[in-house]
Amino acid sequence: MRDIFIFGLTVAALVLVLAGCSQPSEPSGEAIEPAARPSTLQGPEADWNDVRFAAAARAFQQQAETEGQALQALCEPLFSAINAFLDNPQKDFQISAQAAWHRCYEQWQRFSLFHHLAFNPAAQEALNSTRRLINSRPFLPGYIDSLPEYPFSGLVHETGLELTLDNLMGQHQMMDLDSASLGFPAVETLLWKTGLDEYWRVNGGDNDTAIKRRHQYLRIASIQLQDLLGQAQLRWSAQLGFTGLSDSTQQRIVWVSLEQQIRQDLLELSFAPDARDEPVWHHPSFVAGQGKRHLLAKLAGLEALLASDEQTASALASWLDRSGYAVSATALGDHLADTTSAISALPDNTPASDIGDEAWQSAATSLTQLADDISHIRQQLSTQNGN
C-alpha cells in the first residue's frame, strides 16, 4: 500500500505552479453539429425515423436539468452550514455541516453522469479540468492538512504559501493526480478535522496560525466548489448545447457518459480487486465515510432514465427496444436492479468495511454485467454511426 502519510511531508518543498485547469467551463461559442432533419421518406425507408433518438435525448436533457436543480437545492445548505461553523466553531454546527456535505456530495454523484462529455469535442479538456477540480479520487488527505502521524504536514501548515484561490489551483494535482487541493476532497478533509480547541478555535496558543489558515482554506475551497457546481448545473439548464446536436452525437454523449459512469467511476474505481485491502484508494468518501450511499448514487441516473410507469415504457427503454440491439431494455433494467440490490446488501461504509467474499463478489459480478451491457450498446452505436 502506498504510504499516504509520507507524502504529507513533501509539501514544504512544493513550488507554486499554476495548474492547467483554470477554465472551469466549456468555451463559449462552441460549434454545434446540427440536428438531422426529419425524414420525409415514405414506405420501408421511413422505418429509420421510427428509431430516432429525439425522445430519449429529451429525457436525458430533462433528467440533467432535474438533477441539476436538486444539486443546487441540496448544496446551498452545505455552504451556509460551513459559514455558520466557521463563524462559530461549535460541535453542533460542525455536525450539521458534515451532514450537509454528505447530502451535497451524494447529489453530485447522481448529477456527475451529466458531466462526462462536452457538447463540442474542443471543449472536452476544459470539462475534464472542471471534473478534476470538483472531485478527484483517490486523493491524499495529508496533502491538504495534518495527519496524526505527521501533525505539521499539508498545505494548511505550509506557511510560506499564501492561501489564495490562484495558489490553491496551482497546487491542485501539481505533483500527481492524487494531490488534490480543492473540491469535495478539500472540504471533506477539513470538515472532518474534529477537536474544536485543537483545530478550529483561536485561543492564543501555538496552533493559532494553523487554525487561522484552516479557516481561510475552508472558506476558499467551499466558495470555489459552490461556483463550480453552479457552472455544472448551468451547462444544462439553458438548453443551448445538447438539444441542438445531431441524433448520432446525442446518442454518443448518452451512452459514453453511461459507460464512463458505470464502468470507470464505479466498477474500476470502487470495485477493483484490491479495494477491500486498500480502501483509501477506492473509497468514494474515505475521510467522511458512508461509502455505500455514494456508490448507489452513481446508479441513480440510469435508474431514472429507465424508469417506466405501468402503461408506458421510458423514452430510453422504448428507443433501445425499437433499435433491436443485442441488449434489450428489459435485460438492462434487470441487470441494473440486480446491481442495486447487490450493492445495497453491502455494509454502509463499503469498501472500508468487513465485507464477506460472497456479498462482495455478487456486487462486483452484477456491476460487471451492467457495465458490459452498456459497453455492448455503445460499441454497436459506434459501429453504426461510424464514430
Image: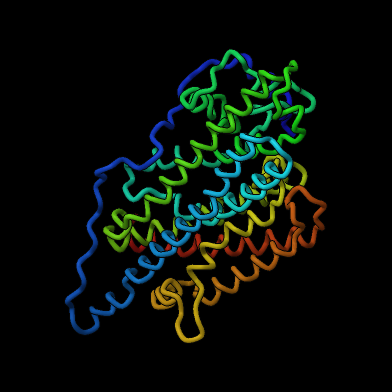
Residue 224 is situated, as x and y percent measured from the top left of the image, at: 49, 36
Q: How is the image coloured?
A: rainbow
> What residue is drawn where x is 75% and y is 58%?
360
All told, the count of numbered labels is 0
Residue 102 is situated, as x and y percent measured from the top left of the image, at: 63, 50
Q: Is residue 220 left or right of residue 32?
A: right
Does the rendering let one see residue 44? Answer: yes
Does the rendering let one see residue 155? Answer: no
Which is nearer the eye, 41 or 287?
Answer: 287
Which is nearer the eye, 49 or 179?
Answer: 179
> What residue is drawn where x is 54% and y is 54%?
74
Name the residue furthest bottom: 311
> What residue is drawn where x is 63% and y is 61%?
367
Q: Give the position of the N terminus as an image quadrant.
A: top right
Q: Is residue 289 left or right of residue 161?
A: right
Residue 336 is situated, as x and y percent measured from the top left of the image, at: 59, 68
Q: Give the position of the C terminus as an image quadrant.
A: bottom left
Q: Is residue 101 left or right of residue 27?
A: right
Residue 248 is situated, as x and y percent measured from the top left of the image, at: 32, 61
Q: Is residue 215 left or right of residue 16?
A: right
> What residue is drawn where x is 69% and y is 19%?
208
| Relative to 327, residue 291 above or below | above
| Relative to 312, residue 143 above or below | above
